[in-house]
Amino acid sequence: MAQYTPKVKEAHAFLEISQDFTTPAEIFRESIANSLDAYARRLWLRAIVEPVRGRETVFIDLSDDGIGMNADTIKSFLNLSDSVKPKEPPAGKPARQMTGYKGHGTKVYFNSESLEVLSYDGTSAPVVCRLSDPRGELADGKVPTADIEDLTLEDLKSRREAWGIQDLGTGPGTSIRVTGYHQNSKSGLEHDRLRDYILWFTRWGSWEPKLRTVTGTTSRAVEDLRTCELSLRGLGTNDYEKLPYGHVFPLADCTDVRQLRAKDDVDPLKHYVRTWAFTNEPLHKNPEKKIDFLFAIEGEAARREYNNMLRRQGKPRRPGDYLSEERYGLWLGCDFVPVQRFNAWVSERSEYTRMHAFVNSDDLDLTANRGSVENTSQDLLADIEATVRNIFAERIEETPDYVKFQDELLDIERQRHAEKEAQDYRRRLKRLEARDIATINGVEFYSPETETDVIALVSGVQALLPNLLPFVVRDYDSHFGFDGLATRKKQLSVNETKHLFVEFKLDLKKDFNHSFENLEAILCWTARLKDGESVVDLAGRKGTYQITTQKDGRKVRIIVVPGSVHNVEVVAFKELLEQHGYKFRPSGE
C-alpha cells in the first residue's frame, strides 16, 4: 500500500494568510499583542507618509521595549505557524497571559513592499532583518528571502535614531518598519480612526479594567498594564499621543432621572448610564468553563461625552465615524477584546443601540484573522448564549434600576408619540386649509394631493353622480397592482359583466409605473402630457398620448398602444368636473 504525505504550497499559504487581514488597522492589533506578549512596557506606534522617488509612500513603524529577538529567534518571527512565546517573565516582572500561538499574525507584515526589523534581546548581538518586496515575491509564487545581519550597539542606536525611536537607546526591544502596507493604502490610518480602533479592538483597549472596577475585584494583568505606556501617531498629526490603557466608558453611572432632567427635560435618558458586571460565571452545561459579562445602558448624549467618533447630526462626515447601531451592542470575544456581535442574545433590535456590553470567554476558537468566533463549537456558543440570557433575565432585567429605566423609557415614547400626533394634526390642518374646495350636491370635496386622495374623491363623487364617469368603479385596492376594478355596463350585477382594470394617478406623466397589459383606463386628476407625446410603461412598452377635441368642445384622451387590441382611455377628472360645472376654488372664497 502506497503512502503519501500531503504537502503545503508555502508561498500560496503565506500569501493567503498575509491578505486574510482586511483592514490596515489590524496590523496595529497584531503588533500590540506581540509587544505585550514580549513583556513590553512602552510601545510606539506610528503611521507616516513620505515621498520616495516622487511617490507618496506609507510607512508604519511599530516599536516596543520588550525582550527582543536575536539572529535565531527572529526566524520564528518570520516563519509560518512557528510562534515562540517566553515561558517565564523577565526578572522582577509579573507573568502575562499570552494571546498569540498560531503564528499567523506577524505574516500580516508580508502584505507590503518591504519589511525591516531591528531587534535586541539585551544579551546577544543586535540584529537587523530585511525582506524586499515580500508581497510581490508571494504573488510570483516565491517565499520571500530574509537578509539577517548582526549589528553593533552603536549601529543599533544609530538606526533607531534614524527611525525616530531614540528613546530605546541601546536597550532591549524591537522595531518593525512596514513600507507600502496593504497596497500603500492610507485609509484607516488617520489618527482619530486608529485611536478608536486601538481602544475598541486590541488588547490595549481591554474592557477588563471596567469589569474589575464594577465588580470590586482585582487582576494582575490590569495592575501590570496600567503602568505601561502606548504612544500613537497616526496620519494627520505630527505628535505622539499617549493612550490610556483600557476601553473607554462613561466616567460614572448616572441613574437619577430627576437630575438628568436638568440636562434634558424632553429625553433625560439620553444622559442615563447604568452598568452591571459579573465575573467568573460558570456556563450552565460546562461549569468548568467560565465567562465574564459586562452590561451597560448608555444614552446617546452620555456616549458623545467620551466618544468623538460618533457621527454628529448636521455635521460633515469624517473618515471612520459611525452611528451607535453600527458599533454598540453585545460583543463576544476573548482576552477582553471584542470579536463578534450577538445583539439578539439580550435585546430586540430597537433596544440594542443603548447597550454597551461585552462577554469574555477564553474557550473560544477564533478564525486566523481574529475576525470571527465561527471556529468555536456550536454547542459551546449555545451554552454561552444560554448563560448570558439567564444572567440578564434574573440579575439585570429584574433589578429596580432596569425596571425604572424601562418605565421611564415607555413614558418618554408615549409622550413623543403624543407630540408627533399633535404635530401631524397641525401639519394636516395647515395642508387642508391650503387646498381648493368644490361643493357637489351639497357635499364639500377638497382637491387631491396624493393618489389616495384621488381614489377617495372619485369614490365620493361617483356616489353622488353615478353617471359622470363612462364606467363604474366597484372595487378599490391601492396596495398592489391596479387601483380599481370597473365595468362599463353599470346596470348589470357583479357576476353578469366583465370587469376591467382602472389605474388612478394624481398626475399622468411620461413614465407609467404599471403595464398597459389588461389596463382599460387611467383616471387622473390632471394630465401633464402634450398631444403626441410618448408614454412608457413598466415593461418598457411605448404608447402615444392623443387628444381629440369633439364638436361640443369636450376633449377625448387615449393612449394608443401599438399591437394592442384596444387603446387605454384617459380621464382627466378635474377637467371632467369643470365641464359639468363643478370648479375647485380656494377654501377662503
Image (cartoon, rainbow, N blue to C red):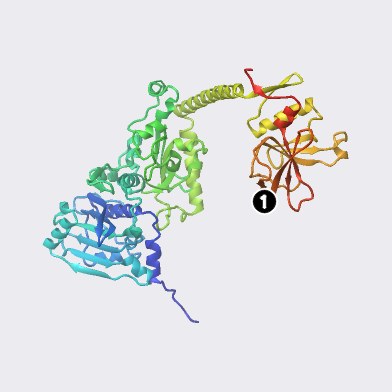
* Spot occupied by residue 549 in the image (x, y as percentages of width and height): 75, 38
* Spot occupied by residue 563 in the image (x, y as percentages of width and height): 75, 53
Q: Which residue extends farthest front?
A: 551
Q: Amino acid at mark 1?
A: Ala
* Spot occupied by residue 221 in the image (x, y as percentages of width and height): 29, 46
Q: Quadrant of the C terminus?
A: top right
The quarter of the picture where residue 156 lies is: bottom left
* Spot occupied by residue 392 in the image (x, y as percentages of width and height): 47, 37
Exactly how many numbered labels are in the figure?
1
Q: Which residue extends farthest left?
A: 154
- Please report the residue visible at 13 percent of the width from the left and 64 percent of the height from the top: 152
| Of 536 and 454, the residue lying toward us | 536
The quarter of the picture where residue 261 lies is: top left
**Measured along the vertical axis of the image, is residue 490 above or below residue 511?**
above
**Measured along the vertical axis of the image, is residue 586 above or below residue 11?**
above
Left or right: where 391 falls relative to 121: right
Left or right: where 73 falls relative to 268: left
- Please report the residue visible at 77 percent of the width from the left and 38 percent of the height from the top: 485
Q: Which residue extends farthest bottom?
A: 1
**Measured along the vertical axis of the image, is residue 14 above or below residue 61?**
below
Q: Which residue is mark 1?
A: 539
Mark 1 neighbour class, 10 Å CA radius: few under 14, some 14 to 19, many 20 or more: few
Question: Could one spot residue 424 in this view of the protein?
Answer: yes
- Please report the residue visible at 36 percent of the width from the left and 68 percent of the height from the top: 138
Question: Could one spot residue 274 in this view of the protein?
Answer: no
- Please report the residue visible at 46 percent of the width from the left and 34 percent of the height from the top: 395
> What secondary structure is marked by label 1?
loop
